[in-house]
Image (tube, rainbow, N blue to C red):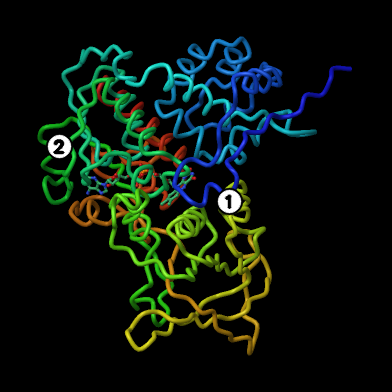
Amino acid sequence: MAEKKIRQHMQNRSAQERIKDFKEVPLGFTPEQAIAEAKRCIQCKKPLCVSGCPVEIDIPGFIKFVAQGDFESAVQKIKETNALPAVCGRVCPQEDQCEKQCILGIKGEAVAIGNLERFVADYERSKIKDQSSKQTPSSKSKDQKIAVIGSGPAGLTCAGDLARKGYQVTVFESLHVTGGVLTYGIPEFRLPKAIVNLEVEYIKSLGVEVKVDMLIGNVYTIKELLKDYQAVFIGSGAGLPKFMKVPGENLDGVYSANEYLFRINMMKAWNFPANLTPIKIGKRVAVVGGGNVAMDAARVSLRLGAEEVYIIYRRTEKEMPARLEEVHRAHEEGIIFKTLILPVKYHANADGWVEFAECLQMELGEPDSSGRCRPVPVAGSEFRVSVDTVVVAIGNSPNPLVPQRTPDLKVEKWGGVIVNEQGLASIPGVYAGGDIVRGAATVISAMGDGKVAAKAIDQQLSA
Ligand SMILES: Cc1cc2nc3c(=O)[nH]c(=O)nc-3n(C[C@H](O)[C@H](O)[C@H](O)COP(=O)(O)OP(=O)(O)OC[C@H]3O[C@@H](n4cnc5c(N)ncnc54)[C@H](O)[C@@H]3O)c2cc1C
């Protein structure tokens, strides 16, 4: 019988060391680990892992190159369908996608596809600092022009795919920087800004023009864009914070996770003491929510000097939507998980700053429409949690500006732009994808949508 090979695991920096700075937590595979891990792949004839990947990377194909030690060919294989491998290798929930389908996972551990992707992307980065110098810009063989709204993963993917096909693509980004949530949301210790910038440079090197400080809806409407561009892709994301609508959420010291992380990322609070961002972090920070955003907000709080950081979540840890490895790292770093708790009111001190959260103890009831057990308040269980800062991380809704300024664009009641299977919206020539369609979702689903729309735009314009 063949010897059963054990999955390789990446080393992490120790929790004591890493909570003092914003440098990356995992150290990545060594070349030896990468080759050993790649050799675990049994090269299935009908690879299920590929069907679990929204951008359809030839996973066995790239892993075969890794097993041969040909890392350069491996990364080029990935880039045939995915222009953001270093990003995806770091933040994609592979455990729910490609790795979930891996046949080795049935009786043991799936191949570490995400870690291998990360490894080869980093290998390439270490060899060539400027990826654009390596890329031959696509010849803009077609006259047609396409406008892409937003430079997050949806917009970048759509733009890159269309540029590869020879279209003249312009990305309009409202901020002064590119990358969307990859830049302004996800913290440096999970996704370094330099890596995002390099992958954006790669997209530009394919011939994509990027115009920043362009708030579409204000600077130009979609109707105006359609006069100059043959198609428009809306990838403007979901950055509108949701609140619980409980008393006291407007007190000083209560933030939405969006504002909190935006200030820390964009105003460079992470780069202290060089940048003294005006964000007040108390000694006790409570983050309300159980997703990736909540874990990020909690872990940055610790790095910015909070002494006690709580995750307050109304269900149990089992139901948390955050990636398991991020929950694990949050535990290692000393975040205190207060589960089955619901804040119902925030109280202020004499200066108007939040002082404590009034909470209810919850218990789990019957499953709700999401399939998760519904949290039910325990009668008479009111209690207080003392806090100096509260971060509300319970989700985001689609950015409303573009739909508001585009009367013919049909949207769901909750704000998502309505599209068909090809990403076509209710206006001819207008496509959409990513969080503006799905609500807050994932990087890879946004990229998958960008790809689908690029294909449909190409079909429309080639007809
Ligand atoms: C803190 C945080 C952590 C996350 N962690 C993960 C994770 O670990 N794994 C994962 O898969 N997903 C994660 N996500 C979710 C993921 O980042 C998003 O699903 C993804 O970025 C959506 O991509 P998008 O391109 O649709 O939108 P976005 O990334 O939001 O990009 C939209 C872009 O459009 C721009 N824009 C908006 N309005 C306009 C306008 N009117 N004109 C011009 N430009 C405009 C915005 O400035 C932005 O740059 C996380 C999200 C957050 C907030």
Q: In the picture shown, does residue 398 fall above or below 11?
A: below
Residue 117 lies, with reference to residue 215, above or below; the image says above
Q: Mark 1: is the Cβ under 8 angstroms from ligand 1?
A: no
Where residue 106 sits in the image (x, y, percent)? 76, 34
Query: Which type of secondary structure does the marked residue at label 2 adopt?
Result: helix
Question: How many numbered marks, from 0 up?
Answer: 2
Task: Out of 194 and 364, give the one closest to the viewer.
Answer: 194
Instruction: Please give the residue where the numbered disc 1 appears in the rendered image.
Output: 16
Q: Name which residue lies at 57% across and 49% down.
A: 326
Q: Label 1 amino acid?
A: Gln
Q: Nearer the viewer, residue 21 or 428?
A: 21
Q: Is residue 364 above or below residue 396?
A: below
Neighbours of disc 1 within 10 Å: few (<14), some (14-19), many (20+): few
Q: In which quarter of the image is the C terminus?
A: top left
Q: Which numbered tag is attached to residue 226?
A: 2
Rendered location of residue 198, percent (x, y): 34, 28
Which residue is at 40% across, 79% downward? 354
Please name whichever residue, 252 or 400, is drawn nearer the observer in this view of the structure.
252
Identify the amino acid type marked 2.
Leu
Rendering quarter of residue 278: bottom left
313 relative position to 449: left or right: right
- Tell whether 45 sits left or right of 220: right
Q: In this view, does 308 lie to the left or right of 81?
A: right
The residue sitting at 74% across, 28% down in the picture is 104
Which quarter shows the N terminus?
top right
Mark 2 closeness class: few <14, some 14–19, many ≥20 residues within 10 Å: some
